[in-house]
Image: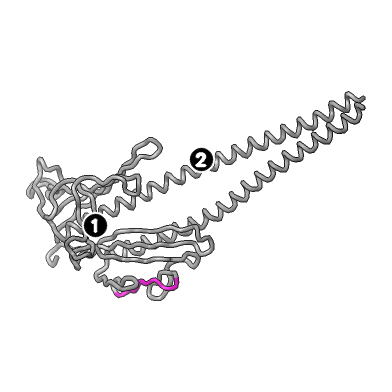
Amino acid sequence: MRDKIRNQRGYLAVEAMMAVVIFVVMVIGLFSAVGFLATRARGAGSDTEAGLIMQEGIEVGYNILMTGWMRFGEGEYFPARSTVERGGKGEWVLLPGKENGVKAKYARWIEIERVCRIPVGEEQAGERTNCLGGEIDLNSRLIRSVVEWEEEGEWKRIEEELVVAKI
Amino acid sequence: MKKKVSGGMTMIEMLIVLTISVVVFWVSTSMVTGLFYSDERSKQEQLLDRAKDQLEQEFGERVRWAKEIEDREDGVKLDGVNYQLRGGRIMKEGKAITPDRVVVEAFEIENLSTDSHYQSLEIKVEMRDKMISSVHDSMRMVVSQRKTAIGGENG
């Protein structure tokens, strides 16, 4: 009788301990799922941020071309602010090369290229083509804004092009 | 004698189980409370994100296709429409375009173009949640005025 009673008391403690362990495992599993979803949400935020940086490149490139058509030749540049020529007031300039460490993680640059078109008299005249077989259009230039970054060991890249016409 | 030892062991086991249960429930309550708070915080962060999206859309389209852009001390005037910061909200012709729960702390516009016919504006907005001040965000966008020409005989 005593043995039976003793065994039943010991069994109650074991049951309680098992219930606690199961509960803790469930809670850990739940919070792991929440953490996974939070990581996914952060990834989506990076894409949005990169998109804004890319758009800024297009906007600055457009303004630079419209305010000084041949001020910058073909090549790779990145947008910067200068206060040298306007007495302390800022203005956009393009500096050669790529800019790294934008918002601590992005690399960005703008590519300016010539635009070539199919010559007049040929089929689809006026359409853009590669410059080997086409004529250079002196009244058009191409801006390509590129952003690259690394996320969870994988490199990502987005780019956008804009053909600007001199009017 | 044995009965007394058995009674003492039962109470100790119960006390241990109760103590562990209290600790577990306290930890789980803290986690649930934290989840609830972060859920509330997450909602306010989403509200700030939506406010940012709305401002980006408003200024992006307005500035890009504006025929006339005038610098103002407290904002900007786009084709005769005034945008100003008043009472922690951005006003468009006197009507708020940011939510009541969002406090706009700074609204700065700088023209970085060298040509007044092709303006390029850098627009910066700093905002925070009215109730949870630690929830804050900022927006910075660059948008350049476009010029268009229609082709044809009169183009």
Instruction: Tell me which numbered mark, 1 or 2, is placed earlier along the sequence.
Output: 2
Q: Which residue is mark 1?
A: A81
Compared to residue B115, the image places residue A145 above or below, namely: above
In the foreground, B91 or B113: B113
Q: Amino acid at mark 2?
A: Phe
Q: Quadrant of the C terminus of chain B?
A: bottom left
State the image coordinates of residue A44 (x, y, percent, origin top left). 42, 46
* Disc 2 element: helix
State the image coordinates of residue A63 (x, y, percent, origin top left). 21, 59
Q: Amino acid at mark 1?
A: Arg
Asked if the stretch drawn in magenta spans residue A2, the answer is: no
Image quarter of residue B26? top right
Q: Which residue is mark 2?
A: A36
In the foreground, A73 or B20: B20
A88 left or right of B135 in image:
left
Callout 2: chain: A
User: What span is colored magenta in the figure?
Assistant: B80-87
